[in-house]
Image: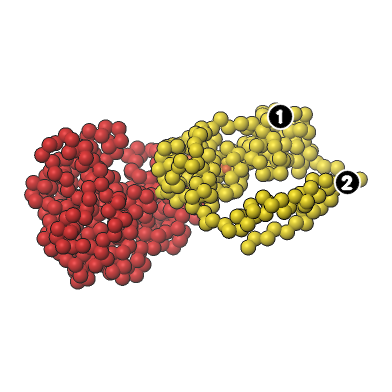
Chain colours: A red, B yellow
């Protein structure tokens, strides 16, 4: 079965392994991600300035182009793309004035946006359409003994209206982790912000946030963390060398995209190219648990 | 005698002139007595020197075009743009990598794109300008090179961009990177270079050089282009 897929820029650059592992894992479940044509940036962050329509154009252009390509839905892997597309969709569909203004601006496109494209995050499709039981049944290399902390950050669960699960106590990623045969460990800071773009201008803020998040996961015994956001993955993974300098007791911990663990459990195997995209080496823990 | 052409009204930099209908913006300006020293080049729509902005009577849209290609209409208001002082970093192609990191270093502004498509609307070459900028952002240099292939560096996209991106300088970097690092190597090129080294075509080139203009023009327009 084909899933109309919106990749987003980062999945074509720094997070290529996110896309690659998702594709390989889904193939084991008889699903294929089919990339929509002529997509543009998702808009990156949903703009809170309600009157600056310019900042909505990027997202809406994707929806409009998807609609023109007869796609009824788009699946995203990146939390940020999911959140931005979903909120922008609501922004124009919930206010026809906004929709009209945006469409007026789009006169070079072949059609106007009517508002018919649904946005899904892959995690919800795994839960609701593909079903975790099916995933579980297809697991050939159960992640036995691996203690995984599922890190949600902000964008999968906030604001409440667009949350992919209970916005205060989500379990969707833990449920996936359990279906892969690993042990899901709940930890205190799984919904805290990673510091996001502060990492560019005020790195110390992100370093502190990342430390608090990782520390709270390690305190309850996590061996690894999963995420679905390339920015969270960057902050949690690539800032560990900074954390090590500031917090002497800190031990590094590997950060995975949830799809990488799916790929391992579903028998795709590990790809050395994915390792190169990580900062903290993800292989030792997988080797230690006899998973690769 | 040919039929007399109708005269129409054109506002050139705000001043009203009557010019023959069917004129291009350049020829109407020259008809009106302007002597154009900057912002005119090949007059064939290739060089991109004669960027112009205009508005047609009754239309709210400010449009861009090439003055040598755009035919004036009654009541049109035009202004020439002789030069676009756009940002242009220098680089050594041999030291660059054919991926997005090169653009992060040399053109960090490209990531400011909001996908408004204003550049595409402005482009006289009907290039999908926004889409090549978006391709650059995601590191798809081949797509950027292909989409921007017909760019003549007129500068109109950059003039209209709300994010102050210099699209065409990004595009030429993409094409250079593509040509140097990504494009399939052509065995024909080596053969041809060898032939040139061996002076195989010198005689023909001499012939062309000495050809009278009408003969040259006849040969040019009847040439066959073989694409294999
Ligand atoms: S891409 Fe920009 S510079 Fe190139 S032809 Fe189009 S408007 Fe002119
Ligand atoms: S005009 Fe500028 S901001 Fe708008 S799509 Fe083009 S490059 Fe992007």
Circle 2 crowding by C-alpha within 10 Å: few under 14, some 14–19, many from 20: few
Residue at x-position 13% and y-position 41%? A250
Please name the residue that numbered disc 2 is placed on: B2
Q: Is residue A286 above or below residue A216?
A: below
Residue at x-position 19% and y-position 50%? A254
Q: Is residue A142 above or below residue A50?
A: below
Q: Which mark is residue A264?
A: none
Q: Is residue B174 above or below residue A135?
A: above
Question: Residue B124 location in percent, x, y?
Answer: 61, 44
Question: Residue A219 location in percent, x, y?
Answer: 8, 46
**Can residue A100 be seen in the rendering of this structure?**
no
Q: CA distance from mark 2 to mark 1?
A: 31 Å
Judging from the image, what secondary structure is the residue with disc 1 in? Answer: loop
State which quarter of the image contains the C terminus of chain A: bottom left
Furthest toward the left, the residue is: A220
Q: In the image, is the residue at mark 2 within 8 Å of ligand 1 by its beta carbon?
A: no
Circle 1 crowding by C-alpha within 10 Å: few under 14, some 14–19, many from 20: few
Please name the residue that numbered disc 1 is placed on: B37
Question: Residue B73 location in percent, x, y?
Answer: 70, 41
State which quarter of the image contains the N terminus of chain A: bottom left
- Foreground of the two, A157 or A280: A280
Question: Residue A234 location in percent, x, y?
Answer: 27, 45
- Foreground of the two, A138 or B176: B176
**Chain of residue at mark 2:** B
């Amino acid at each position: 079965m084909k899933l109309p897929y919106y990749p987003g820029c980062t999945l074509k650059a720094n997070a290529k392994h996110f896309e690659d592992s998702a594709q390989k894992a889904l193939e084991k479940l008889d699903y294929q991600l089919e990339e929509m044509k002529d997509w543009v940036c998702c808009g990156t962050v949903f703009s809170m300035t309600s009157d600056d329509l310019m900042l909505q154009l990027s997202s809406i252009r994707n929806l409009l182009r998807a609609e023109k390509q007869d796609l009824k839905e788009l699946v995203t892997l990146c939390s940020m793309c999911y959140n931005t597309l979903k909120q922008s969709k609501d922004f124009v569909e919930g206010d026809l004035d906004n929709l009209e203004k945006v469409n007026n601006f789009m006169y070079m496109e072949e059609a106007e946006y009517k508002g018919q494209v649904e946005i899904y995050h892959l995690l919800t499709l795994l839960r609701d359409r593909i079903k975790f039981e099916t995933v579980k049944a297809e697991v050939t290399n159960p992640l036995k003994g691996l203690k995984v902390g599922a890190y949600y950050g902000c964008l999968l669960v906030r604001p409440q209206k667009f949350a992919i699960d209970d916005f205060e106590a989500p379990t969707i990623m833990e449920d996936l982790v359990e279906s892969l045969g690993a042990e899901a460990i709940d930890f205190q800071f799984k919904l805290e912000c990673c510091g996001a773009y502060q990492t560019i201008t005020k790195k110390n803020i992100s370093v502190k946030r990342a430390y608090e998040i990782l520390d709270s996961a390690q305190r309850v015994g996590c061996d690894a963390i999963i995420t679905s956001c390339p920015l969270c993955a960057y902050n949690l993974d690539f800032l560990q060398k900074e954390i090590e300098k500031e917090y002497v007791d800190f031990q590094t911990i590997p950060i995975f995209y949830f799809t990488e663990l799916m790929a391992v459990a579903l028998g795709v195997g590990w790809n050395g190219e994915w390792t190169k995209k990580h900062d903290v080496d993800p292989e030792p823990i997988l080797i230690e648990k006899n998973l690769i | 005698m040919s039929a007399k052409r109708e005269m129409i009204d054109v506002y050139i930099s705000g001043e009203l002139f009557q010019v023959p209908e069917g004129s291009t913006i350049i020829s109407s300006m020259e008809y009106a007595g302007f002597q154009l020293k900057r912002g005119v080049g090949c007059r064939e729509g290739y060089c991109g020197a004669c960027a112009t902005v205009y508005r047609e009577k009754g239309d709210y849209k400010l449009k861009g075009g090439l003055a040598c290609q755009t035919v004036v209409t009654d009541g049109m208001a035009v202004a020439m743009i002789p030069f676009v002082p756009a940002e242009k970093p220098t680089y050594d192609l041999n030291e660059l990598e054919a991926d997005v990191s090169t653009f992060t270093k040399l053109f960090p502004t490209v990531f400011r794109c909001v996908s408004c498509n204003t550049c595409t609307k402005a482009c006289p070459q009907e290039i999908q300008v926004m889409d090549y900028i978006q391709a650059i952002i995601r590191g798809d240099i081949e797509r950027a090179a292909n989409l921007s292939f017909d760019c003549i560096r007129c500068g109109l996209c950059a003039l209209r961009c709300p994010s102050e991106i210099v699209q065409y300088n990004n595009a030429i970097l993409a094409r250079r990177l593509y040509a140097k690092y990504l494009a399939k190597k052509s065995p024909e090129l080596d053969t041809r270079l060898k032939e040139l080294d061996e002076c195989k075509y010198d005689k023909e080139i001499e012939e062309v050089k000495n050809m009278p203009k009408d003969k040259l023009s006849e040969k040019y327009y009847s040439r066959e282009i073989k694409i294999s």
